[in-house]
Image: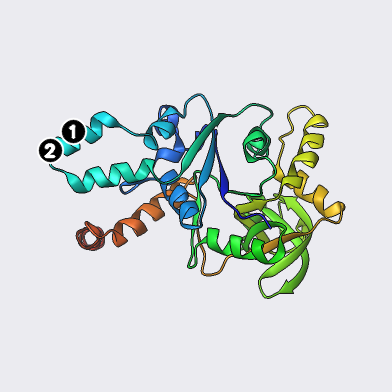
Amino acid sequence: MAKIKKALIPAAGFGTRFLPQTKAMPKEMMPLVDKPIIQRVVEELVDGGIETIVIVTGWNKRSIEDHFDNNFELEEKLLSSGKTEALEMVRKISDLAEFVYVRQKGPQGNATPILNAKHIMGNDPFMLFFGDDFIDATPSRARQLIEAYEKYGSTILAAGKVKSEGDYKKYGFVGGDYVEDGVLRVKSIVEKPGSSSASPSDTTVMSGYIFTPDIYEPLEKAEKTLEEGQELVYTFGVQALIDQGIPVHAVEIKDAIYRDTGNKLEYLKTIIEYGLKHEDIGDDFRNFLENLIMEERS
């Protein structure tokens, strides 16, 4: 069985929910204290053993490439200033993995980046994480997905349980039979069913996937039959695999906290939580928040 050494990060969206901030800054580069969101995603992938990361970008995403590239002028400045810790940190970013950049071409939808990266992924299985959301978990989401892939050798979907009725309008949902605790052999998948009554179950597909190379053919067929204005979504390919009898499994990520940083409120919540945990400013930040709350109540 081929090892998972490659990963795909779709990062071509416009981030309209954060305008005007994202007019010039990619949403994936918005900071969580002192790291852009996409760096946290990359670090998780690397921790899971990923060596090559393909980032599918758009015309306004050059700063993502710059962030993971070497900056010799900055490094020289830090070196001459004696800021060795900062220098080591900056160099480490560009050494995280081999980065490959592809411009997105094709119809709208979360499956288009998969086809855009086909010539790089080749016949290898690969992981897909989005660049503007992530999951905190122990072991990491990446490690849990890889463990499941090594056991089942199939397409693997990260999954969790629904938390509110509104989730049925935001995420994909799967139905099927449990083959072991927390692992579902998927029989159906629905993108944003809209309500619990229209959903195959209360198991939602979270942000994280391992795809095998057989995902390409059904997506290419789906692309040719899209109706005007219809998006090309990964669920078309996954359902086609299921219909062909090809195994697909959904794995509930254990001890998971989903960070939807594309949502303003959730983004602010994440910043506060990460700020409180930050080794340099955590205590001072906590004192500030406590004093602020006391002032608001007085």
Q: Position of residue 46 (x, y in %)?
A: 47, 52
- How has the structure been colored for display? rainbow
Q: Position of residue 289 (x, y in %)?
A: 25, 59
The residue wearing badge 1 is: 77
State the residue in front, 68 or 236: 68
Residue at 71% x, 41% y is 233
Identity, as a three-letter code, of the amino acid under mark 1: Lys
State the residue in front, 28 or 165: 28
- Looking at the image, the residue that sits furthest to the right is 244
Is 106 on the left or on the right of 54, as rendered? right
Identity, as a three-letter code, of the amino acid under mark 2: Ser
Is 129 on the left or on the right of 267, as rendered? right
Callout 1 touching callout 2 (CB < 8 Å): yes
The residue wearing badge 2 is: 81
Is 124 on the left or on the right of 46, as rendered? right
Marking on residue 256: none
Specify few, some or many for label 2: CA neighbours under 10 Å numbering under 14, 14-19, or 20 or more. Answer: few
